[in-house]
Image: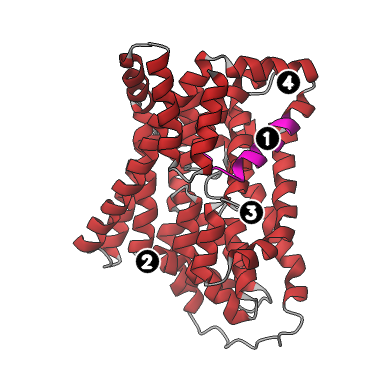
């Protein structure tokens, strides 16, 4: 039956069947053939989303929509551009910083690309970078959002692995900053090469009070993420409450900045409902598929096979990363996370890998898959936003894997960096 489950799942994926059906159909057939009561199936689906922590998911998504609807993105970008506009390569540097500040409020890579991408790519093109490179940098920096809190994939992992939602979100702080630092260093180093045939632009001098004015407009948004993070750090908010506070804060900003409209709010809610429904369908479908795999003892089989091969923690981590990179090339992050977490959690527990640390490694690695052909949705989203071919973006992205993979290896093999904030608070 195990071969049937995996074989049918892969066949359906190959035929282009939506991932929800590709996981749900084999699982449903398995439950019928094995004569397991269907109440177990429905109970498993209900249990997978029956968690207060899951409330954070639609709230995080709504935050991302409201940021764009109320034009908070434009205010922060204007301030960052004012600060760095006389520095050569400023647009690429602002791209990295913006992803850390704003994508951390929605926790979704595709939201970062779609919401910030047009502004960032256009600015980089205006400075002299190619549109393909702008799309590549935007795609690379979008990886930060799902790592830096708040994060939707980390919330999903917390539910599957049954770990603290607050702890896994806090564990993403330093890795998120590390990714941003590595990418910022890279774009700074290659700027002269990328702009070698572009004349140095002479920018208009900053007008008196312009920097202060742009700072005042951007300040409420600049402190939004720290408010949410520190609220969780000191136990004031749970992840769901942090999401609710974030939404409330953005609604107040929208009113104060005179950007609030009922149409904008309704459109944001519609987008949130659609995105949330998709995630919930994937989670429920994935839960019955992983239950079927567990009943067929797949986690124990893979765990025993790996441990018979090696019990060295470093080698196990490398194997996990390699397997997730391959899986991420063909599956979206959330369904892959649902399927692979029970398998690797069994292995990690036996070799002494902290479940929180494992969650950061898994989400980070799978998000790289979002930017990787042949299925990576981020790649096609960035190409669409930049109006270039996916192959052009992929070509520009290859060198950007260097800082990304460097950050991944640092996170993977120095667990104290990931767990420091968690242990401190």
Whether residues under marks 1 and 2 lie with C-beta atoms below 8 angstroms apart, the answer is no
From this viewpoint, is residue 79 visible? no
Residue span colored magenta: 317-334
Residue 306 circle label: 4
Q: Quadrant of residue 351?
A: top right
| Distance between mark 1 and mark 3 Cα atoms | 25 Å
Query: Residue at point 62% right, 25% down?
Result: 344
Residue 320 lies within the magenta run: yes
Question: Mark 3 packing: few (<14 Cα in 10 Å), some, or many (20+)?
Answer: many
| Distance between mark 3 and mark 2 Cα atoms | 23 Å
| Distance between mark 4 and mark 3 Cα atoms | 33 Å
The secondary structure type at the circle numbered 1 is helix
Whether residues under marks 4 and 2 lie with C-beta atoms below 8 angstroms apart, the answer is no
Per the image, the residue denoted by label 1 is: 323
Whether residues under marks 1 and 3 lie with C-beta atoms below 8 angstroms apart, the answer is no
* Residue 147 spot, x, y in % from top left: 56, 43
Question: Mark 2 or mark 3, which is nearer the start of the sequence?
Answer: 2
The secondary structure type at the circle numbered 4 is helix
Question: Mark 3 or mark 4, which is nearer the start of the sequence?
Answer: 3
Q: Compare residues 320 and 71 and report the one nearer the observer.
A: 320
Whether residues under marks 4 and 3 lie with C-beta atoms below 8 angstroms apart, the answer is no
| Distance between mark 4 and mark 1 Cα atoms | 12 Å
* Residue 159 spot, x, y in % from top left: 45, 27
Q: Nearer the viewer, mark 1 or mark 2?
A: 1
């Amino acid at each position: 039956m195990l071969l049937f489950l995996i074989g049918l799942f892969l066949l359906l994926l190959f035929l282009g069947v939506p991932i929800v059906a590709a996981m749900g159909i084999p699982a449903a057939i398995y439950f019928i053939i094995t004569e397991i009561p269907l109440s177990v199936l429905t109970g498993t689906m209900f249990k997978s989303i029956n968690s207060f922590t899951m409330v954070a998911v639609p709230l995080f998504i709504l935050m991302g929509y409201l940021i764009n609807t109320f034009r908070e993105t434009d205010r922060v970008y204007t301030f960052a551009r004012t600060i760095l506009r006389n520095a050569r390569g400023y647009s690429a540097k602002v791209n990295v910083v913006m992803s850390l500040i704003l994508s951390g409020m929605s926790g979704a890579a595709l939201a970062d690309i779609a919401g910030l991408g047009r502004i960032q790519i256009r600015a980089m093109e205006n400075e002299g970078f190619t549109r393909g490179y702008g799309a590549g940098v935007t795609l690379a920096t979008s990886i930060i959002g799902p790592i830096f809190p708040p994060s939707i994939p980390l919330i999903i992992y917390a539910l599957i692995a049954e770990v603290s939602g607050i702890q896994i979100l806090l564990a993403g702080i330093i890795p998120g900053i590390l990714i941003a630092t590595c990418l910022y260093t890279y774009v700074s180093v290659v700027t002269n090469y990328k702009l070698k045939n572009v004349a140095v632009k002479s920018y208009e001098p900053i007008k008196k009070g312009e920097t202060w004015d742009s700072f005042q407009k951007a300040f409420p948004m600049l402190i939004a993420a720290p408010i949410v993070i520190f609220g969780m750090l000191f136990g004031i908010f749970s992840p769901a409450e942090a999401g609710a506070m974030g939404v409330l804060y953005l609604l107040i900003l929208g009113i104060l900045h005179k950007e609030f409209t009922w149409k904008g709010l309704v459109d944001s809610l519609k987008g949130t409902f659609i995105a949330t429904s998709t995630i919930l369908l994937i989670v429920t479908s994935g839960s019955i598929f992983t239950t079927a795999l567990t009943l067929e003892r797949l986690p124990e089989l893979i765990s025993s096979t790996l441990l018979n091969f090696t019990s060295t923690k470093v080698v196990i981590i490398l194997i996990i990363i390699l397997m997730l990179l391959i899986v991420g090339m063909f599956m979206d992050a959330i369904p892959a996370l649902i399927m692979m977490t029970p398998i690797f959690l069994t292995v990690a527990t036996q070799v002494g890998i902290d479940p929180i640390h494992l969650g950061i490694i898994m989400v980070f690695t799978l998000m790289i898959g979002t930017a990787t052909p042949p299925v990576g949705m981020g790649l096609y989203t960035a190409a669409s936003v930049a109006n270039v071919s996916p192959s052009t973006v992929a070509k520009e992205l290859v060198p950007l894997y260097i800082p990304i993979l460097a950050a991944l290896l640092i996170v993977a093999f120095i667990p104290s960096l990931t767990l420091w904030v968690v242990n401190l608070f």
